[in-house]
Image: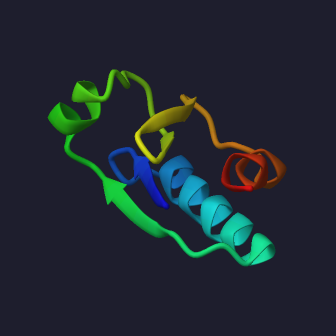
């Protein structure tokens, strides 16, 4: 499983990354978590607001920090 956390590195983006990592740990799921901060690359994915979470190529959340329970559903 590949998870991308998209954003410039602001506090919300960092919080989104922490939520993703906590959800992975809670579920015991192995995944590669990548930080994407290049705006051109983010825009290619159709994302124009950050933070955003992409799971296996599917955009799951844009413009907000997801709740841990949401992330756990996405990775289940």
Protein image colouring = rainbow
**Which quarter of the figure is the C terminus placed in?**
bottom right
Image position, residue 38 (x, y; %): 20, 44
In the displayed structure, would residue 46 be above or below residue 27? above
Residue 4 location, x and y as percent?
42, 52
Total marks drawn? 0
Apparent side of residue 47 relative to residue 75 in the rendered image (left or right): left
In the displayed structure image, the side of residue 9 where residue 28 appears, left or right: right
Image point (61%, 34%), residue name: 64
Along the line of sight, the residue nearer the viewer: 51 or 31: 31
Against 66, is 20 above or below? below
Residue drawn at point x = 67 percent, y = 60 percent: 19
Residue placed farthest to the right in the image? Answer: 69
| Image point (71%, 50%), residue name | 71
Left or right of residue 12: residue 22: right
Compared with 41, 36 (above or below) is: below
Could you tell whether 37 is left or right of 2 in the image? left
Camera-nearest residue between 76 and 12: 76
Residue 13 location (% of width, % of height):
49, 50
Residue 74 drawn at (x, y percent): 69, 46
Q: Is residue 1 above or below residue 12?
A: below
Between 53 and 29, the residue placed more toward the observer is 29
Q: Quadrant of residue 35?
A: bottom left
Please tell me which residue is depicted at 78% across the width and 48% down the height of the picture: 73
């Amino acid at each position: 499983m590949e998870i991308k956390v998209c954003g410039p590195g602001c506090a919300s983006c960092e919080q989104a990354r922490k939520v993703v990592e906590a959800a992975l740990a809670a579920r015991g799921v192995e995944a590669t978590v990548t930080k994407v901060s290049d705006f051109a690359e983010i825009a290619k994915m159709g994302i124009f607001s950050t933070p955003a979470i992409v799971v296996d190529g599917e955009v799951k959340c844009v413009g907000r920090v997801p709740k841990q329970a949401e992330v756990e559903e996405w990775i289940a």
